Image: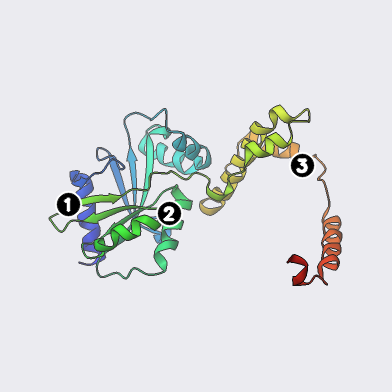
Amino acid sequence: MNERELKSLFCSSLRSNHIKNNDLIPASKIRIVEEAHCRSFDLLIAAMTKEPDMHDYGQYNNMLVRTQLLKQFARQQKCRIDCIRFYPVEIKSDDDVLDERLPKQIIDAILAFGLSILVLDKNHSKLAHGLGKFLPTTLICYTGIDDHFEVVSRFDRLISSGVLNLKKTILAKALEGSNAGSKAYSRLVEIERIFQKIIFNQLYFENLGMTEPELEFLQMITGIRPPSSYSQEMKKLSKLIKETENTKMTDYI
């Protein structure tokens, strides 16, 4: 079938709760948006749970980083921000070719919403076992029967920050000998979270979405003299280049 037909069947399956092994997307109260985020995703599912999961640390981080997006939707739907989950979905019918674009689409979904869902048509589903080993996405396959689908592989991490994570414990230990050592970890957490929020909001909003305390924190940092200037760094690089320009491969053997 083509993409439109598969998309229609999948939406019907969601609303009818016909997805086997589905413990990811709540079937009770959902809103489905097609061609979401400037056509970046085939479907964007917004699910609203009745009660928040107080032990879901990944969702807690997700709320801190993606505050603007969640707050915007919460106002529209008149619900609590911690009861919202977003699920970006990529649809691949048997008429579609699985090529080098697929990993990029999965990465885009993870960067935007922290997770990815890939829906495969019946013939493509034969590749699901192999794809599930290597792709960081939840795979949902069409069974070929009415509007019935099945979750065959699940990637259960909610990635709120990705490569922007700092090795905070190691950095904090390096400062243990100073007066600031005991406070280092919490300060590093705050710096990391602010940078994550700035980078995410630059992707989808015109403003940075910073709170007053966060702006004040950054203003305090601007009053601290950096350890070295650009000119000093360039001098160090120039010296390093001179030291290594005559290095021979035999020096490393």
The disc at residue 222 is 3
On the image, the x and y values in percent for residue 127 come to 28, 63
The disc at residue 109 is 2
Asked which secondary structure carries label 1, the reply is loop
The disc at residue 15 is none
On the image, the x and y values in percent for residue 181 come to 73, 30
Residue projecting furthest to the left: 146
Residue at the spot x=24%, y=62% of the render? 126
Asked which secondary structure carries label 3, the reply is helix
Circle nearer the N terminus (1, 2): 2
The disc at residue 148 is 1
Out of 47 and 19, give the one closest to the viewer.
Answer: 19
Out of 248 and 83, give the one closest to the viewer.
Answer: 248
Out of 168 and 47, give the one closest to the viewer.
Answer: 168
Q: How is the image coloured?
A: rainbow
On the image, the x and y values in percent for residue 67 come to 50, 39
The quarter of the picture where the C terminus appears is bottom right
The amino acid marked with disc number 1 is His
